[in-house]
Amino acid sequence: MIKLVNIQKNYSEKQVLKDISFEVKKGSIYALLGTNGVGKTTTLKIISGLLKPTSGRVVIDGKEMDSEEGGQISADIGFVPDHTFLYDYLTGVEYLRFTAEMFQVPSQRTNDYIKKMLEMLKLSQDGNQLIKTYSHGMKQKLSIAAALIHQPKILILDEPLTGIDLISGKTIRTLLKEYVKQGNTVLLSTHLLELAHSLCDTIGIIHEGVFAAEYQSAEHSLEEIEEMAERIYT
């Protein structure tokens, strides 16, 4: 579904990504694991089409991102950044309607979606409150709902559960699992190994701009991956 081939990204003389190559299978949840500042966010932005790589190729569903079909590919992706960018003086419902209009989602489908998602994310009682009154967890859940409103095939999330309370985290995990059951794909970044192992099918480790290793969660225990990751980091 997602394929990166020898991706490099340079800022002036600094090389942030060094020949990154990996694949994400359709209908799976894939975690990019790494400490802060190793290139996870840059990688996700390149896949989302928000950044252009210095060199290398991004292939989504068999199509090159850097091609005439790039615009359509981007429309099939929902992206949630590590810091939410929401309009504080809109209500949650107003923000979802605004996002739906940007993606030209039919009004009836929008109404049904908003009702369903607010119930699933436990935001029904807060949907008509201003976003500025929302907690961090509520804003994160609203951001995910907005990213999915146009029914993309791929959802990309940058550190989605950092600073999230236990209940909100459980709700988001359930939502992501239901999303991939429909044949969609999730790619997320995290520095939390336990989250990556419990939620994701595959874990790819990035360290100092290099794709250092890849593990299948079903084939290795949390302790085994933790030991291997520590060897990479040190």
Image (cartoon, rainbow, N blue to C red):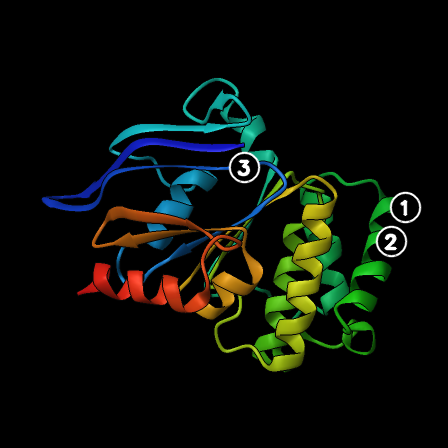
Q: CA distance from mark 2 to mark 3?
A: 32 Å
Helix, strand or loop status at disc 3: loop
Residue under label 1: 108
Residue 67 is situated, as x and y percent measured from the top left of the image, at 44, 19
Residue under label 2: 111
Does residue 125 appear left or right of residue 16 in this picture? right
| Quadrant of the frame with the N terminus | top right
Which residue does the image show at 59% across and 68% down from the upper left?
Answer: 140
User: Which residue type carries mark 1?
Assistant: Gln
| Quadrant of the frame with the C terminus | bottom left
Q: Is residue 192 visible?
A: no
From the viewer's perspective, is residue 80 above or below residue 103? below
Q: 224 or 34: nearer the eye?
A: 224
Q: CA distance from mark 3 to mark 1?
A: 32 Å
Does residue 221 appear left or right of residue 199 in this picture? left
Q: CA distance from mark 2 to mark 1?
A: 5 Å
From the viewer's perspective, is residue 114 above or below residue 136? above
User: Which residue type carries mark 3?
Assistant: Lys
Does residue 189 appear left or right of residue 110 in this picture? left
- State yes or no: discs 2 and 1 in contact (Cβ < 8 Å): yes
